[in-house]
Image (tube, coloured by chain):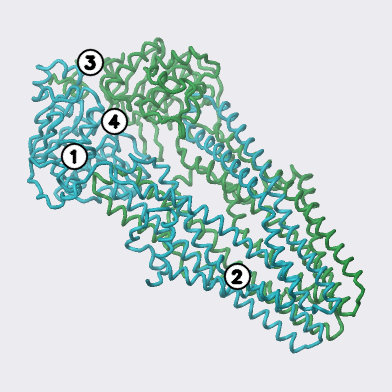
Amino acid sequence: MPYVSLRDLPRSDPGRPDLRTPTRFLVWIGRMQLPALTLGVTWGVLWMGAAALIPGALGAGVQAIADGNETAVLRWSLVVLGLGVFQAGAGLLRHRAAVTNWISAASRVQQLIVRQAARLGGDLPRQVATGEVVAATANDVERIGSAFDVLARFAGAIVAFFGVAAILLTINAPLGTVVLVGVPVLSLSISPLVRPLERRERDQRVKLGLATELAADTVAGLRVLRGIGGEDLFLERYRLASAEVRLAAVRTAQVRSLLDALQVFLPGIFVVTVTWFGARLAIDGRLSIGALVAFYGYTAFMVLPLRTVTETAHKWTAARVAAQRVLSVLRLERTYAEDPESADHPEPEVGGLVDVRSGLAVTPGQLTAVVTDDPLTADTMADRLGRYSDGEVKLSGTRLSDLPIDVVRRRVLVQDKDPVILSGSASDLFEIPRTGRVGVLQALSWASANDVVEALPEGLATDLPERGRSLSGGQRQRLALARSLVADPDVLVLDEPTSAVDTHTEARIGLGLRQAREGRTTVVFTTSPLLLEHADIVAFVQSGTVVATGSHRDLMRSTPAYRATVVRGVG
Amino acid sequence: MKPPESFDMTSPAQAALLPVSEPPAVRRHVRQLLRRHARLFGWLIALNSVAAVASVVGPQVLGGVVQRLQDGDTSSTFANRAALVFLAALLVQTVFTRFARLRGAVLGETILADLRESFLRRVVVLPPGVVERAGTGDLVTRTTTDVDRLSWAVRMAVPEITIAMGTAVFVLGALVLTAPALALSWLVAIPPIIVVMRWYFRRAPQAYRREMAGYARVNAEVAEAVDAGRTLEAYRLGPARVARTDATIKRWISWERYTMYLRTVFFPSVEIAYVMPLAAVLAMGGFLYTQGQVNLAQVTAAVLYTQMLIEPVDTMLMWYDELQVGQASLARLLGVNEVPDPDTDDHEPADAEIVARQVRFGYRDGRDVLHGVDMDVEPGERIAIVGPSGAGKSTLGRLLAGLHRPRSGSIEMGGVELGRLPTETVRRHVALVTQEHHVFVGTVRDNLLLAQPAATDTDLWSALAAVDATDWVSTLPAGLDSRVGTGGGRLSPAQAQQLALARLVLADPHTLVLDEATSLLDPRAARHLEQSLGAVLDGRTVIAIAHRLMTAHDAQRVIVVEDGRIAEAGSHDELVAAGGAYAALWRSWRDEG
């Protein structure tokens, strides 16, 4: 496996992950970037190794001064300088490798998630809340990345700890033992404080989250508040939440400041002990001055590797939890079964669409309108026609469930009730697989969306925000319709495409739709007379079944229930 | 290495709408804060100073021990005494560190709470016209991201940097007092640190913000892929979305590479700069020692001080950037104070009659949306405004609700210029409900009470009945006490609109402007709601902007707006009889054509 540098990321294919357990998933990620990990570990060891040697060199330097050996003093100063320069270089390479590992792991997980989203399409938001996936990408990706970042330092820490241990034991066995046993024991002795600190920090985070949410919510609804009142009510709510945050933060600070103080005291008490014990050894002539200075330095140094070990343990625990959440997204499958043999099925000819359950039969090349007595029926029928849910629907006599899903999506386009305007420029909206027969400007004019584009500051080049939030509901609907017309599928199914459009425009759209889909198969679910009068044929659905078909005018005359549904309440 | 192509972080149009404080104003504010809490700050400095002084005892003690050893002192009392002094200093340092940190946190949290609360206090009284123009996006970012960043800076960066600064001063002082000649060795480190610092901090803050923006962009795209899953699937955009996200990841990584390059220059430079004085102290100490100018105690202490000094200097450099980020956020929070308050005229309107004369208005200079509108609204009248999209209906509605002032011409209510009235006065008389709805986090009751804090449950239920919402509210798990809004029970857009209208019923102003206020309801439900609402609003003036002709049909007067002008006006029957554009539309709609 070759080394992959940042320049070559992201990869074209993130690979097939091991989804069995969180640990296996993390191990799989590690295996995929083994060369970069090895590099990081190597530099981590060299880096911390150099750092570990500096107190020794300083001690030797002081000894040389004490001995009045000028050449040795100079030599040891150069050794300190050399170690420092080497440490800086190795530290940098270690850092670069660690960042590469972080990004390598993080971007791989991001790629896996977006590929999963692309594979499942509408089936993903149906199975998990968008917020959950967002949390998975924003926080969990970062946590998984950090677990690989820390590995290089972890390896260095282990080597440094045992290396220093060996040095200390060689210089003086009893003193060495005191440091080796004492430092870890004292480091662990702060652990009773860690848990309450984490608990209080969690509590503080939760309260901060609530206060922020409250403030953001107040600001988001500011138009309502300014229009109707209630500012004081909301300010008071926020003031209480903010006071809670302050109290929680002070409670955290009580423990944290204790921990900060202990982190001064515990290593300090060791330095005191070592100085005292070392001085007594030196008096007896069993320890040189230089060694005493070195011991003083090592005792302070040992805190660093131990802290790294604790940090690693924390990060890997967090990464496992994060991996679990990522897996819950990556493990999802489609909610409806796909026939494995469907790939071999011959593609059906251009033809009509039949929904067996409702009895709706769509004649090829015609504009069919469907009026349902209940809006929900329209949604479920549209879903069925596009095989977004199971149901017996035939395209030119072939059951949709016998066809590969790609073929169904290519042949039948269902524009649902809430089509999303994707972020990007307005012209990006039309960058979709299409037949090429319908131009963008043509489609915009058929959908009466010319003025929407004209009103944008830079026309089609204007960047639209997520979900086209800067546009009104009617403007969004018209752009979405234009997009569907550009796609120009064999069968186009539209669910309430003009519900938010004003009457003037709706009338124009009815005409445009008719021209745009001339000779193509179109199904439109609507109750608007302005669209219905342009349909070749209208099917009226009551309680999920087609009860009457005919032209809009015929049905208006012949079917009172139809008339009541379409112009309910006019007279 | 050149910085990569940039992510546009905020749209320039939005950035220009709400002010950001200039650095002098921010500094002035910080000075005010310092003055207001002068006593607490004084205590903090004192506590930290004692802790820092105690921390410089250790090397002095070890130096003394080394000196005694060198002098051949073999009595063990000096070792014991040294250890006791060291221990005492350590205890002092520990205790003072604890209280310095705790006091610091308490003060920091007080200041933070004060800042965020006064920010929101200012935001909720912003003129509605400003909010309307600027949109809430920028304000929400300030409320969330900027408050978070500032908190982080005040909680971490400010104490870390100030404590490090104090420690550095005392350690350096100790070094100078111990061996002034050896302290000079730090001079070799200062010029390279300054040079590389200037280079780094000129590039780093912006680069890191870009990098974060890139990371956020990747997340936003993944989120959109999930949210718009159905749309991506229907238009077969899956592969395109994967390619696009991969490209965004690549752009993000290009910023990661750039910041890594910055660190590649910065890290080794400063680290080598740190170790240079260490080697220099050792070499110079050896030389001066042989010259008899310093003793071994001084050399040892000087070496240890030099090593001790590295940590605070490094801390200052590492946190410097966060401090700058915090300062930028503070500037954005203070910026809302600089939104000018409009000049107002607080006369109570005499009655509910609205008179609009030759109203011209546009959101951008030179691009008027309304071109001379004349209109009279009698108290209690029901008016429908119809017309094609973009004709200026909503704009007219906003002006009639007092949200904006006409560029020329006038709109008066009861003889008083509507746009000059303070918001709090306007809303007792007129309220606007648009299709943009908002469900506040809280209970259904919270969402209603804001309109009428004194309302009883009976009032609330009858308001809900007026908007056909009794059924679904009573089936909620806890009725009026059910939690709704983000994180609570999800309401449908139609239900949210019903809540908005129920608020209006409770607020009960004499004039209501409804801009597509029922557009998110099913057409049939909307019609029913309008009728039951109509019964409750008997006697109130209702101006309804609608795209459904049924609304117009029910109104006493219909105003057809086209291209920013009133094209036709009259009752439904009059307009149908007149045979104009409205009549044509009505006929095709009623299928009588």
Residue A500: give its label.
Answer: 4
**Secondary structure category for the residue under label 4:** loop
Colour of the chain lettered B: green
* Callouts 3 and 4 close, C-beta under 8 Å: no
Going 45% across and 37% down the picture, which residue do you hit? B133
Q: Tell me, yes or no, if residue B376 can be seen here.
A: no
**Secondary structure category for the residue under label 2:** helix
Q: Say few, some or many: other residues with alpha carbon within 10 Å of mark 4 (under 14 / 14 to 19 / 20 or more).
A: many
N-terminal-most mark, 1 or 4 = 1
| B392 w.r.t. A126: above or below | above
Look at label 2 and name its amino acid: Val
Q: Output the chain of dot 4.
A: A
Residue B440: give its label.
Answer: none
Foreground mark, 3 or 1, reads 3
Q: Say few, some or many: other residues with alpha carbon within 10 Å of mark 2 (under 14 / 14 to 19 / 20 or more).
A: some
Mark 3 highlights which residue?
A: A570
Going 40% across and 27% down the picture, which residue do you hit? B496
Q: Output the chain of dot 2.
A: B
Residue A408 in the image, given as x and y percentages of width and height: 17, 45
Look at label 4 and name its amino acid: Ala
Residue A472 in the image, given as x and y percentages of width and height: 34, 35
Mark 2 highlights which residue?
A: B196
* Callouts 3 and 2 close, C-beta under 8 Å: no
Residue A491 in the image, given as x and y percentages of width and height: 14, 41
Colour of the chain lettered A: cyan
**Secondary structure category for the residue under label 1:** helix
Q: Output the chain of dot 1.
A: A
| Circles 3 and 2 on the same subunit | no
Mark 1 highlights which residue?
A: A446
- What separation in Å lies between label 3 and label 4 (alpha carbons)? 19 Å
- What separation in Å lies between label 3 and label 1 (alpha carbons)? 29 Å
